[in-house]
Image (tube, rainbow, N blue to C red):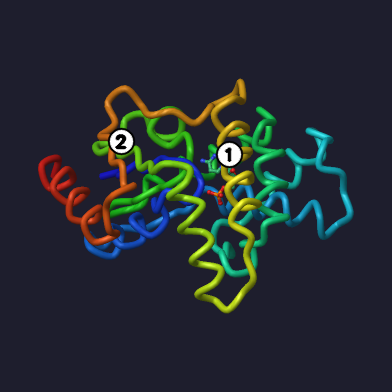
Amino acid sequence: MIIAIDGPAASGKGTLSRRLAEEYGFHHLDTGLTYRATAKALIDAGLPLDDEKVAEKVAKGVELAGLDRDILSSHEIGEAASKIAVMPSVRRALVEAQRDFSQREPGTVLDGRDIGTVVCPNAQVKLYVTASPEVRARRRYDEILAKGGMADYAAIFADVKKRDERDMGRADSPLKPAEDAYLLDTSEMSIEAAFQAAKVVIDAAL
Ligand code: C5P
C-alpha cells in the first residue's frame, strides 16, 4: 500500500503525511529531505551547485536512514535543493532510492512534488495538498515567530512564489497534480480537518 502526497512548499503536506503514517502504521519518507541532504552535502564540501555530474555523485551517496529535518531546514538549503532538483540525473538517483523505500511493508507514505506523477504512479492513494500562496506564507511566518525567530512576511511571500515558479516550471518532473489525485485545498482548513478528509479518501481505497 502506497500513499502518495504531493504539493507546494508550506502546503501542510509534511504534517499531514506524518500523521497519516502514524495512523496507519506505515513508513514515511519526506522526499524533500533527499534533495536537501544532497544540497547540504555539496555546500558542506564547498562543491558547486551547478555541476550536474558532481551533484549526481553526491545524490547517489545520500542515506535515507540519516535524514533529519532539523539539520536540513534552513532557507539556504531549501533554495539550494530546489536548484539541484532541476537536474535530471540528480532526480534519477534520488527517485531510485525513493522507489525502493516505497516498497517497504506493510505500507508507505511518501510526500514531495512528483510522487503521484513520477516516483509511484501506481500508488493506491494520491493526494494533492495545496493552499493559496498567501496562506502558505502566513503559516511559515507564524511558524518562525512561534519558535521565537524574526520573520518578514513580504520576504517569505516572495520566497514562496519563487519556489512555486521553480518547482512548477521545470522541465523534468514539474509539480502538478496527478490526473487521478484527490485535491485537498487546505486554505480554509485546519490540520485536523485535512487529516480527517484524507482519512476518508484512504479508508475508501483500503
Ligand atoms: O519539500 P521541501 O521544501 O523540503 O523540498 C525542497 C526542494 O526539493 C523543493 O523546492 C523541490 O525543488 C525539491 N523536491 C523535488 N521533488 C520532490 C521533493 C522535493 O523536486 N519529490
> Could you say whether the residue bearing mark 1 is in a helix, strand or loop?
helix
In the rendered structure, the answer to whether residue 181 lies left or right of residue 56 reads: left
CB under 8 Å between discs 1 and 2? no
In the rendered structure, find residue 161 and report the number of the disc placed on it.
1
Q: Name the residue under label 2.
A: 123
Q: Does mark 2 have its CB less than 8 Å from ligand 1?
A: no
Of residues 18 and 167, the one nearer the viewer is 167
Ligand 1 falls in quadrant? top right
Image point 54% across, 29% down: which residue?
A: 168
Of residues 6 and 206, the one nearer the viewer is 6
The amino acid pointed to by label 1 is Lys
Q: Horizontal and vertical percent for residue 89?
A: 68, 30
Q: Horizontal and vertical percent for residue 196?
A: 17, 55
> Could you say whether the residue bearing mark 2 is in a helix, strand or loop?
loop
The amino acid pointed to by label 2 is Ala
Q: Is residue 62 above or below residue 51?
A: below
Crowding near the residue tagged with mark 2, few <14, some 14–19, many ≥20 C-alpha atoms within 10 Å? many
In the rendered structure, the answer to whether residue 90 lies left or right of residue 3 reads: right
Of residues 189 and 86, the one nearer the viewer is 189
Q: Is residue 147 above or below residue 111?
A: below
Q: Horizontal and vertical percent for residue 48?
A: 87, 44
Q: Is residue 66 above or below residue 28?
A: below
Crowding near the residue tagged with mark 1, few <14, some 14–19, many ≥20 C-alpha atoms within 10 Å? some
Q: In which quarter of the image is the C terminus?
A: top left
Image point 56% across, 36% down: which residue?
A: 164
Q: Marks 1 and 2, Cα distance to the nearest angstrom?
A: 29 Å
Of residues 141 and 30, the one nearer the viewer is 141
User: Nearer the N terminus, badge 1 or badge 2?
Assistant: 2
